[in-house]
Amino acid sequence: IGGAVFRIAKPCERCVFTTVDPHTGRKGLDQEPLRTLAQYRRTPAGVIFGQNVIAEGRADLHVGMPVEILE
């Protein structure tokens, strides 16, 4: 992304705070998005949402920049 290289560190689990409505501060009764993610991304570590990555070096990143998968 923009000349920066990232290495995958580990899977990223999601906690119950993703179910809280940011406008009201109340937990959603439907348990989304965790309920949907749990249907196909459940592991022994938890419900996986994405990946934590570590940048190798520095670069300026901006919304909309193209992403190139290296491996």
Image (cartoon, grey):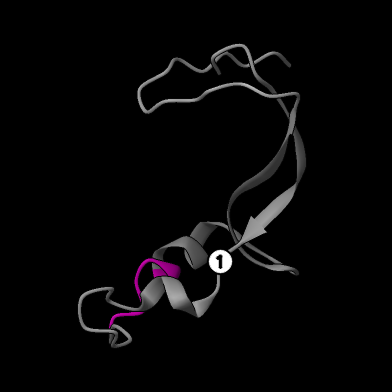
Which residue does the numbered mark 1 point to in the structure image?
Answer: 14
- Residue 67 percent coordinates (x, y): 51, 18
Q: Mostly what secondary structure, the magenta segment?
A: loop
44 w.r.t. 56: above or below:
below
In the rendered image, residue 47, in percent from the top left (x then y), is placed at 59, 65
Closer to us: 7 or 58 = 58
Quarter of the rendering containing residue 49? bottom right
Among the 4 quarters of the image, the one containing residue 18: bottom left
Q: Quadrant of the C terminus?
A: top right
Q: Is residue 20 above or below residue 4?
A: below
Residue shown at 34% from the left, 71% from the top: 32
Question: Which residue: 44% across, 70% down?
Answer: 34
Q: Residue at x 42, y 18 (%)?
A: 65
Residue 50 coordinates in the image, percent (x, y): 58, 48
Residue 12 position, x and y percent, is: 65, 56
Left or right relative to 7: residue 51: left
The image shows residue 1, relative to residue 52, as above or below, that is above
Magenta residues span: 30-35
Instruction: Give the crowd class for mark 1: few <14, some 14-19, many >=20 residues within 10 Å.
Output: some
